[in-house]
Image (cartoon, rainbow, N blue to C red):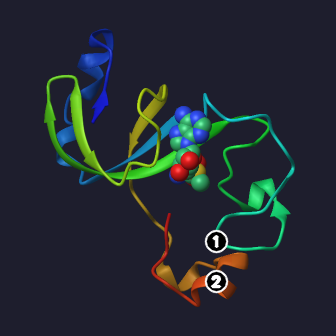
Amino acid sequence: MLEILPAYEQGLMDIDGFSHLYVLWVFDRAAGSSLIATPPLDNRPHGVFATRSPQRPNPIGLTVVALMRREGTKLFVRGIDMLDGTPILDIKPYLSSVPDAELRRGWLTAIDGGAPPVR
Ligand SMILES: C[S@@+](CC[C@H](N)C(=O)[O-])C[C@H]1O[C@@H](n2cnc3c(N)ncnc32)[C@H](O)[C@@H]1O
């Protein structure tokens, strides 16, 4: 559940019409940063900007969630990957305009061999 400060409730008007949302947030418990990351899915190092590592120069997280329902300032969502209490920077409607056929998945292709895109 994403809990929005009451001061921002008006900004949630009409959000209910969107099935998915982008959530921008802070890796507030990340331990430092590194320009090279070795993701748990792979044993090869990659540049941090080619990964979703929490240890990054600007510790900003981005998650696409499914909006199940809204109750006032509470957004009930699925697909969250942030720790409890993580500070949220912003929320925007998810609108993908990139056709699947045009997406390239970089080093992940060698891991999952073409699983459905994660945006
Ligand atoms: C691989 S990152 C991806 C996060 C986001 N989807 C992204 O792409 O920016 C997800 C992991 O970040 C870690 N994490 C979640 N919330 C965090 C926080 N507030 N501070 C530090 N690490 C966090 C958890 O271990 C979680 O499994």
One can see residue 45 in this view: yes
Q: Are marks 2 and 1 in contact (CB under 8 Å)?
A: yes
Q: Nearer the viewer, residue 89 or 18?
A: 89
Q: Nearer the viewer, residue 43 or 95?
A: 43
Q: Which residue type carries mark 2? A: Ile
- Tell which circle, 2 or 1, labels the residue nearer the N-terminal end: 1
**Mark pair 2, 1: CA separation:** 7 Å
Q: Does residue 91 sit above or below 7 in this rendering?
A: below
Name the residue furthest bottom: 113
Q: Is residue 52 left or right of residue 94?
A: right
Labelled disc at residue 111: 2
Q: Is residue 65 left or right of residue 60?
A: left
Q: Does residue 107 sit above or below 61 in this rendering?
A: below
Instruction: Residue at 82%, 73% (x, y): give it.
Output: 44
One can see residue 26 in this view: no
Which quadrant of the figure shows ligand 1?
A: top right
Labelled disc at residue 10: none
Residue 55: x %, y % from top left: 74, 43
The residue labelled by disc 1 is 41
